[in-house]
Amino acid sequence: MANNPSAIKRIGINNKKRVANQSQKSEMRTAIKNVEALVEANDAENAKAALKDTMKYIDKAVQKGIIHKNNGDRQKTRLTNKVNGLGA
């Protein structure tokens, strides 16, 4: 357990940040699952619209350092390929 005041303060700050990051990461994952569900249902138009919103969630998570840049790029590429595969 933390003994000095600065360590106690850091524990509180880290907990607040963890909760905020968890929330944003959860929103991003939910958006990804929504796009994948639309792809499974062969709903091309709604999938494209959902993909656009999902890109914003992924970019925001990368910008805030919640996920790594390469991880974000990989997720966006995979989703884009899935959605583009519907049109073919």
Image (cartoon, grey):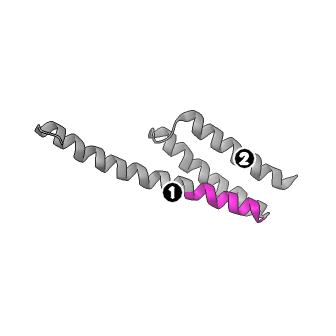
In the image, taking residue 84 as reference, residue 22 lies left or right, namely left
Residue 12 is one of the magenta-drawn residues = no
Q: Main secondary structure of the magenta part?
A: helix
Check residue 45 in the rendering and tell me which mark sits there, or answer none.
Answer: none
Which is more toward the observer, 2 or 36?
2
Residue receiving disc 2:
80
Q: Residue furthest left?
A: 4
Which is more toward the observer, 52 or 65?
65
Q: Above or below — where is 70 with respect to 28?
A: above
In the image, taking residue 2 as reference, residue 87 lies left or right, namely right
Look at label 2 and name its amino acid.
Answer: Thr
The residue range painted magenta reads: 30-41
Quadrant location of the N terminus in the rendered image = top left
- Answer with mark 1 or mark 2, whichever residue precedes in sequence: 1
- Mark 1 burial class by Cα count in 10 Å: few <14, some 14-19, many 20+: some
Q: Above or below — where is 69 with respect to 19?
A: above
Check residue 27 in the rendering and tell me which mark sits there, or answer none.
Answer: 1
